[in-house]
Image (spheres, rainbow, N blue to C red):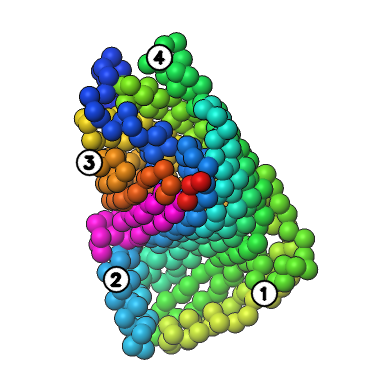
Amino acid sequence: MKRLSIALAATLVLGGDLLAQAVPEGAQATKVPMAYRRTPQLRVDPFRHVMIPHWGLVISGGGLAGNNTVTIADARAMWYLIDNDAELVGDALDLLSNVPDGDGFRLDAEAEGGVYLGGPFGRHFSLGISAKARSYGIGNIDDAAVSLLRDGNVARQNFDLGNSKGVALGTEEFGAHGVIRLGPIASEDGVVLTLGGGARLVKPVFYYAATTTLDSRLYVASDSVAAAVTIDALASIDVDFSDISLGSDLVADFMVRLEWPTSGIAFEAMFANFGSVTVENLELQSKTFEVNSTYITEVLDSLETDFAVTDTVSVTVKLPRIIRFAASAWANRFLQIDVSARLKTTGTVFEYPFEGELGTTWRLIRQLPLRVGLIVGGAQDIGFSGGLGLETRNLFFSVAGRSIGGFLTEGTGVAGRLELGFFF
């Protein structure tokens, strides 16, 4: 929160100095439609396309995956070993031994793909509908379990496995979103107020959640390994969805944007994914295994025992809420500077930490934006982003990427997005 306050305060000071000025003569700010001046992001953004000032069809897709330990170079090496049928157990243990003390091993993934159709009704109102498939995933091996691999068993022999977990949710959604543009207010050069709202009907099509129980333990002696582990799971695996009832729920999205076109200043607040989904007819499964062996590989092999189905239940899953603030200003004729902050999401199955981004958009040619950014916070600390686009009256194309937790192959994750639009 402190970083958010500093970032927004700096932007407000910058905005206060510039509000009294017009954008530089001939600046791209006077020519670029509002939709293309919005600060882009790679996660959920329901208003990404409804702002576009033309009627058309947009096809888009993107994904994000990251962890806190394994770099892209490490992952490529592991893939090479898999292709060559090399021994992997020792290599995997070596990677996990690099997990930072106290953090555990964390995973985060998100993906989406779909289509959007819509456009403006006059100057002040736009409406669009969308159909998408989306998935979320998180995983965490508790630090209590990782400590065995990181610290060894010299100091102790009894290891609590903690509360390790993994959750995956897949959905299909159908949404309708609109924006109302009011202004310029007070004068010809006044502020333009944009209000956005909409809802998505979200239907879960896949869900899996597994956790270790708090009494799961591992014992490591000088000549043997013993384990007593219980894993509970909720699963919709191997279910014929045409034969079961799946819950569908409404999820709400809101946006407020203030923009001074002749000053090149804009502020925006977006609130997305407010709602939950109910997943019905899940199998409640349990697996308990006990092993006492002189080889760690036998402990790993024991994990291959089947889960036992004990009940059928329904669960309500709160989607990861997006609360995001952004500000932008034109520094000169060609350069737009963006500052954004996504607040920490807690108290749900899917949790995300604070994340801030400083980005730049260069428009040496108005229709060909080039974007470069620096991301701080997040689950993987620092990251880098970049992208390019083509924005014309009849065609829209955008490609963006992000390295998470480091630069290029030293990053611990990657994200990307591709969008293609055709306008009538």
- Label 3 sits on a secondary structure element that is loop
Write the start and end of the magenta stretch as one range: 396-421
Which of the 4 image quadrants contains residue 252?
top right
First of labels 2, 4 by sequence position: 2
Q: Position of residue 234 (x, y in %)?
A: 65, 64
Which kind of residue does numbered mark 2 sit on? Asp
Is 18 drawn above or below residue 329 in the view shown?
above
- Label 4 sits on a secondary structure element that is loop
First of labels 2, 1 by sequence position: 2
Q: Residue drawn at (51%, 76%), measured in percent from left and top?
A: 227
**What residue is pinned by disc 3?**
364
Which kind of residue does numbered mark 1 sit on? Asp
Q: Residue drawn at (29%, 40%), measured in percent from left and top?
A: 366
Q: Residue drawn at (53%, 26%), measured in percent from left and top?
A: 124
Q: Position of residue 57 (x, y in %)?
A: 52, 50
Which kind of residue does numbered mark 3 sit on? Leu
Which of the 4 image quadrants contains residue 120?
top right
**What residue is pinned by disc 2?**
74
**What residue is pinned by disc 4?**
188
Q: Residue drawn at (55%, 54%), measured in percent from left and top?
A: 115
Is 129 drawn above or below residue 35 in the view shown?
below
Q: Is residue 362 left or right of residue 54?
A: left
First of labels 1, 3 by sequence position: 1
Spatial distance from mark 1 to mark 3, Cα to Cα? Answer: 53 Å
Q: Position of residue 358 (x, y in %)?
A: 29, 39
